[in-house]
Amino acid sequence: MAEAKQEEVAVAAAAPKGGIVGKLIGVVGMFAACLTAVVAGGYINAQLHAPAEYVLDAKDGRIRIYEPPPPPKPKAEKKKEVKEHQPALFYSMDPPLVVNFEEGSAVRFLQVGVDLMSRDAKAIESVQKLTPLIRNNLLMVISHRDYQSLMGSEGKETLRSEALKEVRKILKKEAPEAEVEDLLFTSFIVQ
């Protein structure tokens, strides 16, 4: 038995254990595998979560995270947004507009009270300055209507929208910065 033990020890001694070179190759292989995992994980993390950008604050010299400013709103939206928050201003055209219609042998009269609405005080000032021109053109628009068509609500609404278009046309030509939002009939008397 002693011989069997000696043979086992001899066989074990003769078998290569890998030595220092084998251990070195194993360690380098493990290092390469770990390095590959760290680099790949960092790349994937950078793709999923972009790193913050830092800037130097000129006022106090501190480094801060850069926050891009919000995109600017188009001018039309800004103007509309500002106007929505301002109160409505009205301008009453006094005296009311009076137009006559001939219906067969009878003469009919229409008296219309008109108010103009805007949210801009400068527009109201422009309307005041242009009142004679606006009154003239509104009288022309109303007088070209048929008396019977003005009796229904649809005819009145059509007349109102045409009168508003006429006022806007005058303002666009004479005072382009002025904008009238609406035209209202405050009285509508037919006789």
Image (cartoon, rainbow, N blue to C red):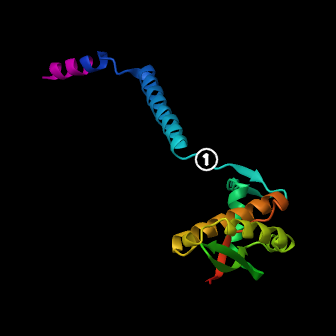
User: In terms of depth relative to the viewer, which is nearer, 97 or 70?
Assistant: 97
Residue 29, compared with residue 149, is above or below; it is: above
Instruction: Give the residue displayed 64% in from the left and 50% down from the top.
Output: 52
Residue 85, compared with residue 171, is above or below; it is: below
Q: Quadrant of residue 16?
A: top left
Name the main secondary structure of what is drawn in magenta: helix
Q: Residue 42: x, y in percent?
A: 53, 40
Reading the image, the residue beneath label 1 is 51
Q: Quadrant of the N terminus?
A: top left
User: In terms of depth relative to the viewer, which is nearer, 131 or 26?
Assistant: 131
Q: Residue 106: x, y in percent?
A: 62, 78
State the residue lying farthest toward the right. 129
User: In terms of depth relative to the viewer, which is nearer, 60 or 141?
Assistant: 141
User: In terms of depth relative to the viewer, which is nearer, 39 or 50?
Assistant: 50
Magenta highlight on residue 4: yes
Q: Quadrant of the C terminus?
A: bottom right
- The answer, for residue 147, to whether it is visible in the render is yes
Q: Is residue 52 left or right of residue 58?
A: left
Magenta highlight on residue 20: no
Which structural element holds mark 1? Answer: loop
Q: Residues within 10 Å of mark 1 (few under 14, many from 20)?
A: few
The boundaries of the magenta stretch are 1-10
Q: Quadrant of residue 90?
A: bottom right
- Which kind of residue does numbered mark 1 sit on? Pro
